C-alpha cells in the first residue's frame, strides 16, 4: 500500500451541488498516466476559480481533483523522456478538467504533457507564471509573429491587474513596447506603472458598445476581457495592427463588426494555452526564462498555503485578485 497524500477533491451530489473537500488519497486513486510527480507548487488561475466555485462547467468528470497547472519533481516514470528527479511543469491538457489535477501533493499524467522547468527557475517561480503567465507569453509571441514590433506603436493590455495582464505588461515593457494598461481598479494604477505600463486607462473607457471604427490608439492588444472591451480594442487598433484575444473575464460575446478587419486590415489572433503544441510551449517557457523580469515576478505574486485555495477561488472570480496567487505544496 503506497503512502497517502492530501488532495482537494471536488464532488457533485445528485442535485448537482458541488462540494470541495480536503481528503487523503493514495497513488491507486490517481488516473492513468506514465509519470508520477511530487507536486511542489501550484496556482489559482481564473479558470480554477470557475472550477472550484462551480460558476462555469470547467470540471467535466466527477469527482475530480481540480487545478490546471503545477510544477514539481518526477517520482517515477515509464516514459523514456523523463526520469525520477527531473523538474517539470504542466499547464492544461485537460488536467483539472477531465483528468485529476494539481490540487494534490501527487499527480499522475502523460509524459508528453510535461515541459522541463527552466534551469534558473524554481517550482514557485514557474507557478507565479503559471498558465496565466504562459498565456501572456503566447499572446506576446503571436503579436511578434504578426510583425507588431515596438516601433509600430503602443500595445493595450486589458484586465491589466489580473494574472495574464500583469505578466503581459511586464513582458511587453521589458521587450521595449509602450504599454497602455486598462483596469477597473483605481487602487492598482501605481502597481501597473511599477510593472512598466506607460499609461493607465479606466476599464469603463472600453466597456460601452463599440463603434465600428474608433480613433486609432494602439498597434496591438492583449485582451483578457472579451465582449465590448475586445470590440472597442479592435475598433481603436491602428491600420495593420493585431489583437491577441485570450480571455473572457467580461463575457463570451463579441459585439463587433467587420469594419476593423476590412477597412484597417486589423487581425484578431486567437490564443489557446490548453491544447497548444508542445514545441510552442517549450519556446514560450524558454522566452519566459529569458524575458520576464525576476523582480516583477516577486512583485506580482502572493504566496498562500494549500488550505487557502477554496477562499481564493471566490476572490479570483470576483475580480479581487492582484497578479498571481501561488500555492506552496512542499
Ligand atoms: P484574473 O482574474 O487574474 O484577471 C482578470 C482581470 O480581468 C481582472 O483582474 C480584472 O482586471 C478584469 N476583469 C474582471 N472582471 C471583469 C469584467 N466583468 N469586465 C472587465 N474586466 C474584468 O484572470 P487571469 O488573468 O487568470 O485570466 C484572464 C482571462 O484569460 C480569463 O478569462 C481566463 O479564463 C483567460 N485565460 C485564457 C487562457 C487561454 O488559454 N485562452 C489561459 C489563461 C487565462 P482589472 O481589475 O485590472 O480591470
Image (tube, helix red, strand yellow):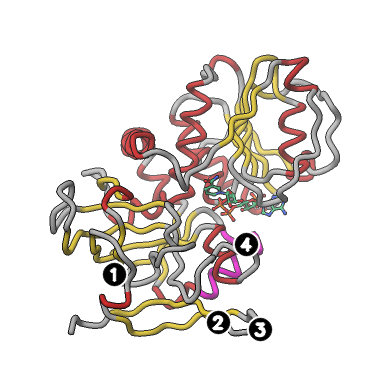
Q: Residues within 10 Å of mark 4 (few under 14, many from 20)?
A: few
Q: Which residue is mark 3?
A: 15
Disc marking residue 320: 4
Check contact, mark 3 vs mark 2: CB within 8 A: no
Nearer-N-terminus badge (4/2):
2
Tell me the element at label 3.
loop
What is the span of residues highlighted in magenta in the rendered image?
310-321
Q: Magenta stretch mostly in which secondary structure?
A: helix
CA distance for labels 1 and 2 = 21 Å
CA distance for labels 3 and 2 = 12 Å
Q: Residues within 10 Å of mark 1 (few under 14, many from 20)?
A: many
Q: Report the side of 246 relative to 38 (left or right).
A: right
CA distance for labels 3 and 4 = 30 Å
CA distance for labels 3 and 1 = 30 Å
Q: Nearer the viewer, residue 50 or 151?
A: 50
CA distance for labels 4 and 2 = 22 Å
Q: Is 277 within the magenta?
A: no
Amino acid at each position: 500500500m503506497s503512502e497517502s497524500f492530501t488532495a482537494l477533491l471536488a464532488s457533485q451530489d445528485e442535485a448537482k451541488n458541488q462540494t470541495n473537500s480536503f481528503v487523503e488519497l493514495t497513488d491507486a486513486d490517481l488516473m492513468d498516466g506514465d509519470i508520477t510527480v511530487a507536486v511542489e507548487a501550484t496556482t489559482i488561475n481564473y479558470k480554477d476559480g470557475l472550477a472550484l466555485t462551480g460558476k462555469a462547467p470547467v470540471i467535466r468528470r466527477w469527482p475530480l481533483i481540480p487545478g490546471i497547472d503545477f510544477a514539481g519533481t518526477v517520482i517515477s516514470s515509464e516514459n523514456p523522456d523523463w526520469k525520477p528527479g527531473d523538474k517539470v511543469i504542466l499547464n492544461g491538457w485537460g488536467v483539472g478538467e477531465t483528468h485529476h489535477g494539481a490540487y494534490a501533493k501527487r499527480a499522475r499524467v502523460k509524459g508528453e504533457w510535461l515541459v522541463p522547468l527552466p534551469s534558473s527557475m524554481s517550482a514557485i517561480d514557474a507557478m507565479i507564471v503559471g498558465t496565466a503567465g504562459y498565456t501572456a507569453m503566447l499572446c506576446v509571441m503571436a503579436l511578434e509573429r504578426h510583425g507588431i514590433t515596438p516601433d509600430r506603436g503602443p500595445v493595450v493590455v486589458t484586465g491589466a491587474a489580473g494574472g495574464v495582464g500583469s505578466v503581459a505588461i511586464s513582458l511587453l515593457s521589458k521587450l521595449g513596447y509602450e504599454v497602455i494598461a486598462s483596469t477597473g481598479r483605481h487602487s492598482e494604477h501605481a502597481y501597473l506603472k511599477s510593472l512598466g505600463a506607460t499609461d493607465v486607462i479606466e476599464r469603463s473607457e472600453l466597456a460601452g458598445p463599440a463603434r465600428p471604427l474608433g480613433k486609432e490608439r494602439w498597434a496591438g492588444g492583449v485582451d483578457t476581457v472579451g465582449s465590448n472591451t475586445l470590440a472597442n480594442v479592435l475598433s481603436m487598433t491602428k491600420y495593420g495592427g493585431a489583437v491577441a484575444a485570450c480571455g473572457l473575464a467580461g463575457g463570451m460575446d463579441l459585439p463587433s463588426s467587420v469594419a476593423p478587419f476590412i477597412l484597417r486590415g486589423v487581425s484578431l489572433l486567437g490564443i489557446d494555452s490548453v491544447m497548444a503544441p508542445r514545441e510552442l510551449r517549450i519556446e514560450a517557457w524558454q522566452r519566459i526564462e529569458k524575458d520576464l523580469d525576476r523582480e516583477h515576478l516577486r512583485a506580482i505574486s502572493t504566496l498562500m498555503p494549500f488550505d487557502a485555495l477554496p477562499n481564493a477561488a471566490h476572490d479570483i472570480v470576483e475580480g479581487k485578485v492582484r497578479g498571481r496567487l501561488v500555492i506552496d505544496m512542499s
